[in-house]
Image (cartoon, rainbow, N blue to C red):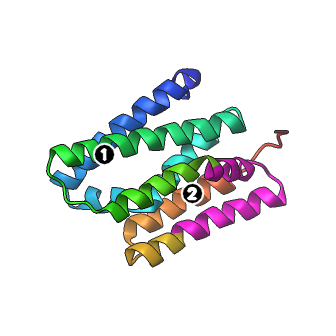
């Protein structure tokens, strides 16, 4: 089952679906609109994708494809639903998407039990909180929940691995 889900084509499809659902959440819900407009939830999703990938290259590819798919369909649906969005948002999310392979590479390091893994894990959590505070006037209750989940995922007992 893991090989089916963590497949580049499936990751792209999941990203395409996530983009549509996120845009629809923007239109029809207040809370989900807020959650999925912020960086913390996308960091969490990226971490989950990387944690379950079997190689560093695959993690970089899968996270990138997921984010590309999400970005494409989000803005296509936004255009068709007369959504209000500015070029700064498009450029910001496009830059984030282009950097996701780098983020995935560092997150792969966080999978390890070395001191580097622990430092990168702490860095991921710090960036999640900092982005919430700096960019989105947070942290909000869902940011705290996301950070707790990240702490669990990134600091639970890890097996040593070579890769």
Looking at the image, residue 99 lies above or below residue 142: above
Looking at the image, residue 75 lies above or below residue 134: above
* Residue at horizontal 14 percent and vertical 51 percent from the top: 82
* Residue at horizontal 50 percent and vertical 56 percent from the top: 96
Looking at the image, residue 129 lies above or below residue 97: below
| SS type, badge 1 | helix
Q: Nearer the viewer, residue 46 or 77?
A: 77
**Residue 126 shows in this picture:** yes
Locate residue 45, reporting x and y percent: 49, 48
10 Å crowding of disc 2: few (<14), some (14-19), many (20+): many
| SS type, badge 2 | helix
**Residue 139 shows in this picture:** no
Q: Quadrant of residue 56?
A: top right
Q: Which residue is mark 1?
A: 74
Q: Which residue is mark 2?
A: 150
Span of residues in magenta: 102-128
Q: In the figure, is residue 6 to the left or right of 156? A: left
Give the Cα separation between the discs numbered 2 and 1. Answer: 25 Å
* Residue at horizontal 36 percent and vertical 65 percent from the top: 88
Q: In the figure, is residue 134 to the left or right of 161? A: left
Rendered-image quadrant of the N terminus: top right
Looking at the image, residue 88 lies above or below residue 76: below
Q: Quadrant of residue 57?
A: top right
Say whether disc 2 or disc 1 marks the residue closer to the N-terminus.
1
Rendered-image quadrant of the C terminus: top right
Q: Which mark is residue 153?
A: none
């Amino acid at each position: 089952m893991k090989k089916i889900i963590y497949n580049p084509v499936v990751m792209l499809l999941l990203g395409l679906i996530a983009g549509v659902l996120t845009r629809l959440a923007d239109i029809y819900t207040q809370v989900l609109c807020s959650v999925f407009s912020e960086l913390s939830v996308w960091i969490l999703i990226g971490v989950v994708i990387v944690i379950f990938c079997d190689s560093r290259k695959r993690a970089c590819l899968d996270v990138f494809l997921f984010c590309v798919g999400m970005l494409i369909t989000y803005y296509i649906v936004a255009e068709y639903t007369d959504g209000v969005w500015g070029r700064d948002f498009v450029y910001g999310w496009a830059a984030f998407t282009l950097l996701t392979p780098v983020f995935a590479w560092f997150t792969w390091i966080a999978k390890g039990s070395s001191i580097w893994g622990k430092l990168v894990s702490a860095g991921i959590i710090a960036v999640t909180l900092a982005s919430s505070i700096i960019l989105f006037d947070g942290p909000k209750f869902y940011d705290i929940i996301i950070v707790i989940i990240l702490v669990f995922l990134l600091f639970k007992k890890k097996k040593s691995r070579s890769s």
